[in-house]
């Protein structure tokens, strides 16, 4: 892999312009033999000529030298496969030296740097040589720290953090893993919490391990119910699919007692289900769902909490400070929340076809009275 490919660029650009080596030499102020040597890679242009050449050919200095600081995602994937195969067929030191040369060339291509770290980590995980494993994982960690500190890609930084923590686990350093992740609040905490639970188990902290996995289950379920309402909406044209989604969601609600545990999480599902049943002209089922919604909205669920425990999630409240986004309280006052719950039904034009129905009027009255 050559660092400088200026010879080909000069040849290509000179021919594009339709000029001879002598004409280029006269413009730059060198001999024709100098241009010939540049094009045959016998020598490189003096550094003082590079800006002049780049300006003459109307290219950047990187383009002039054929230097590509970034690699395409397709190129990265192909290179990863190639190097992975080489680790299996060639001497370790030979492949590692090639990898290091590639990293040096593309040191600012953070997706490539991350994939190289992933390659090191995968090799380190399977290596039977403890010294080799440790050194390979240590190099992976250095690359991952660079990605975390220098990349502007938030998702890539999160991936680098997770892989760095995985390296600590592979190195048998659970305390370092805990220090790395214990205060992290990623948008999708599940994989981080699984790693943390393993680290806590290795350090004999069984309770903390259980707590991390309980939180992972808890918040993964919240994320799941965030996705169900919009999924129901796009399944409304398929009555069979719509019914199956509702059936499974309700089974989860019952299995995990979500009416009591996370009422504000499942109420959007009820609204989406009621609207979907209306689109199928199933007014009775729509009213049944709205009744379930109203029963929750007017039940003894106040004051509402973002993080709430029960007999199954008995360790959740002990670590409520680690709720998503650092929130431990709802961002609105209770009366506003009650009002919004009522308006979502009473003021919703989708339910206007039910406004004169006695059951709907009764539900609307209960919701209004609940506002206080």
Image: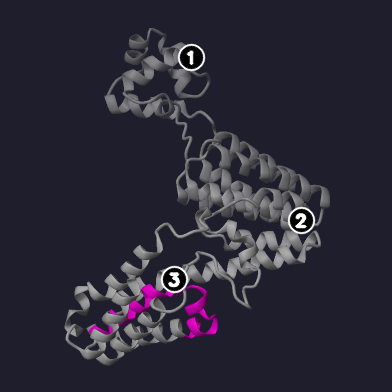
Q: Residues within 10 Å of mark 1 (few under 14, many from 20)?
A: few
Name the one closer to the observer, 99 or 334: 334
Q: Which callout, 3 or 1, points at the residue further toward the start of the chain? A: 1
Magenta stretch, main secondary structure, is helix
By what rule are the colours in the image chosen? one colour
The residue wearing badge 3 is 265
The residue wearing badge 1 is 47
Please report the bounds of the magenta region as a residue range. 251-278
> As displayed, is residue 102 above or below residue 27?
below
Secondary structure of the residue carrying tag 3 is helix
Name the one closer to the observer, 102 or 348: 348
Does the image show residue 218?
Answer: yes
Q: Does the magenta stretch include residue 274?
A: yes
Q: How crowded is mark 3: few (under 14 residues within 10 Å), some or many (20 or more)?
A: some
Tell me what residue is drawn at x 52 percent, y 36 percent. Answer: 108
Q: Which callout, 1 or 2, points at the residue further toward the start of the chain? A: 1
The answer for how far apart the CA atoms under marks 3 and 1 are is 64 Å
The residue wearing badge 2 is 127
Q: Which callout, 2 or 3, points at the residue further toward the start of the chain? A: 2
Q: Position of residue 287 (x, y in %)?
A: 29, 87
> As displayed, is residue 370 above or below residue 86?
below
The answer for how far apart the CA atoms under marks 1 and 2 are is 45 Å
Front: mark 1 or 2: 2
Secondary structure of the residue carrying tag 2 is loop
- Answer with left or right where residue 162 lies relative to residue 370: right
């Amino acid at each position: 892999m050559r660092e400088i490919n200026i010879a080909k660029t000069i040849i290509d650009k000179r021919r594009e312009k339709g000029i001879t080596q002598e004409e280029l030499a006269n413009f730059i102020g060198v001999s024709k033999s100098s241009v010939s040597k540049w094009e045959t890679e016998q020598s490189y242009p003096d550094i003082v000529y590079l800006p002049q050449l780049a300006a003459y050919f109307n290219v950047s200095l990187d383009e002039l030298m054929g230097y590509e600081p970034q690699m395409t995602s397709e190129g990265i994937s192909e290179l990863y496969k190639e190097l992975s195969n080489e680790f299996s067929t060639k001497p370790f030191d030979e492949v590692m030296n090639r990898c290091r040369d590639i990293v040096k060339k593309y040191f600012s291509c953070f997706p490539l740097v991350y994939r190289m770290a992933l390659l090191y980590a995968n090799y380190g995980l399977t290596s039977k040589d403890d010294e080799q494993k440790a050194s390979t994982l240590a190099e992976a960690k250095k690359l991952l720290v660079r990605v975390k500190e220098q990349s502007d890609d938030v998702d890539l930084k999160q991936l680098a953090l997770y892989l760095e923590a995985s390296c600590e686990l592979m190195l048998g350093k659970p305390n370092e893993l805990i220090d790395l992740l214990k205060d992290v609040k990623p948008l999708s905490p599940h994989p981080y919490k699984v790693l943390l639970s393993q680290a806590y188990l290795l350090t004999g902290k069984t309770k903390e391990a259980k707590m991390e996995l309980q939180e992972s289950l808890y918040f993964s379920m919240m994320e799941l119910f965030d996705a169900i309402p919009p999924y129901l909406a796009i399944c409304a044209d398929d009555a069979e699919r719509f019914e199956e989604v509702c059936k499974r969601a309700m089974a989860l609600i019952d299995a995990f007692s979500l009416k009591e545990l996370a009422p504000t999480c499942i109420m959007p599902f009820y609204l989406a289900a009621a609207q979907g049943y209306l689109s199928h002209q199933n007014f009775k089922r729509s009213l049944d769902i709205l009744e379930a919604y109203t029963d929750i909205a007017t039940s003894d669920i106040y004051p509402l909490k973002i993080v709430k425990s029960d007999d199954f999630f008995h360790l959740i409240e002990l670590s409520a400070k680690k709720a998503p986004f650092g929130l431990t309280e709802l961002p609105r006052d209770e009366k506003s929340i009650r009002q919004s719950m009522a308006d979502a039904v009473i003021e919703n034009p989708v339910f206007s076809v039910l406004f004169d129905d006695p059951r709907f009027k009764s539900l609307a009255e209960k919701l209004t009275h609940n506002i206080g």
